[in-house]
Amino acid sequence: MRYSLLDLAPVPEGSEIPQSFQNSADLARQAEGWGYHRYWLAEHHNMPGIASAATAVLIGHIASQTSSIRVGAGGIMLPNHAPYMVAEAFGTLAALYGDRIDLGLGRAPGTDMATARALRRGMAPGAGDSFPQDVIDLMGFLGPLDPEAKVRAFPGQGSNVPVWILGSSLYGAQLAAQLGLPYAFASHFAPQALEQALEVYRRTFRPSTNLEKPHAMVAVNVFGAESDAEGIRLRTTMQQAFARLRLGQPGKLPRPVEDINDHLSPSVLAGVNEALTVSATGSPETVKRELSEILQRYTPDEVIITGQIHDHAARLRSFKIAAEALKTL
C-alpha cells in the first residue's frame, strides 16, 4: 500500500514564511528518500500559520527540489478559481515536471466567506453548487485535444493530469464514484462520516477511462517521537491551532505545551480531540500499533500522513517514524 504526505507549509511561532518554504522543500526531499509516494499541498487563505495559499506556485517549487515523488494539490479549492485557469496552471506544471503532478479538488473555499469573495470577485451566492460541472469542465481542459472545441487550454490540453475528489462528507464520495475518480477523505480533521463515505464511494463507484476500480485515500495525523510522552507533547501544537481556528482566532503554529488541559477548556478540548480521532501519537512502537489499527478498521487503498508540529526537526522525525511503520505494515 502506498503512503503519502500532506503539507500545509506551516509557519510556526517565532518563524516567517520564507523559512516555511525552506522547511517544506527539506521535508519533501527527505520524504522522497523515506518512500512517500506523493507530496501534496493544501490551499488555505487568510491564515497566518499556513503558507500554502498559492498552491500551484508552491507545487512547482517542491517539484523542482525533488526528482521522483509525485507532487500535487490536496487540494485546490475549486470554488475559488475558474476551472480554465486551474487547467492552465496544472498543465504548465505537467509540462515542466512530467507525469509527477496530481490535482486534488475540494468544494469548500478553504477560508472565510469574505476572503472567498476576494478570491473570486463577483462570485454569485450559491456558486459552490456548480462544483460538479466545474470538475467536468476542468477535466475537459486537461483531457485529449478536441479540434471542435472553441476554448482549449494551452498548456493543459492533453496533459491528462490525474484528478482526485477530496471531501469530508458523503457529497464528495458520491461525486467521485459517479465520475469514476479516486477519492481522498479529510479524516485528519473531520472523521465523523469516514466509514459511511468510504462505503458509499466503493458501493456506487462507476468505472471510467480514468480509473477501473475504486481508490480511496484516508488522511491520518501522526505525532511520532522517541516516547509516548513526547508524542503527546508534540500533539498539543495541533490541538491549540485547531482550537484557535474554531474560535475564530487563527494564528501562527503554536509552540507545544506540557499539559494541554492548562490551555484549553474541557469542552473545547473534547471537540478538538474528537476532530483528531484518526491519529497515531507516541513512540515508534505506539505509532505503528495505532496506524495498524486505523488500516485494519478502514482498509484504505492509500494513506496520506500529516501532522502540524512546531519544531522542524521534530516534524521530520515524526514523518520518518510514520514511514518506517508503514513500510512494515
Image (cartoon, helix red, strand yellow):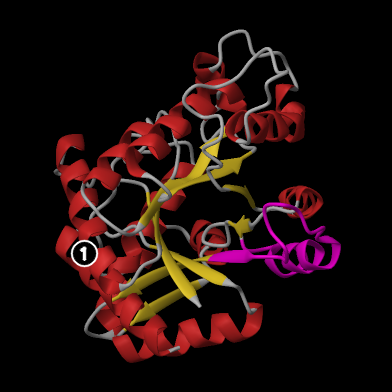
**Left or right of 177: which side holds 188?**
left
Looking at the image, which residue is at 46% across and 25% down? 155
Name the residue furthest right.
204
Q: Residues within 10 Å of mark 1 (few under 14, many from 20)?
A: some
Q: Is residue 205 above or below residue 122?
A: below
Residue 134, quarter of the rendered image: top right
Residue 216 location, x and y as percent?
64, 65
Residue 202, quarter of the rendered image: bottom right
Give the tally of numbered discs.
1
**Left or right of 111: which side holds 173?**
right
Task: Identify which amino acid the numbered label 1 is placed on.
Answer: Gln
Q: Which residues are magenta?
A: 191-218
Residue 275 location, x and y as percent?
56, 61
Q: Which of the pair 19/36 is nearer the observer?
A: 36
Residue 222 location, x and y as percent?
39, 71
Looking at the image, which residue is at 65% across and 65% down? 215
Asked whether 240 falls inside the magenta stretch, the response is no
Asked whether 214 falls inside the magenta stretch, the response is yes
Looking at the image, which residue is at 34% across and 59% down? 69
Q: Is residue 237 visible?
A: yes
Q: Is residue 287 visible?
A: no
Q: Which of the pair 169/255 is nearer the observer?
A: 169
**Left or right of 47: which side holds 107?**
right
Quadrant including the C terminus: bottom left
Q: Which of the pair 165/44 is nearer the observer?
A: 165
For label 1, the residue is: 30
Q: Which of the pair 140/299 is nearer the observer?
A: 140
**Left or right of 17: which side holds 184?**
right
Residue 6 location, x and y as percent?
41, 56
Q: Is residue 176 above or below residue 3?
A: above
Task: Give SS at disc 1.
Answer: helix
Q: Is residue 265 above or below residue 103?
A: below
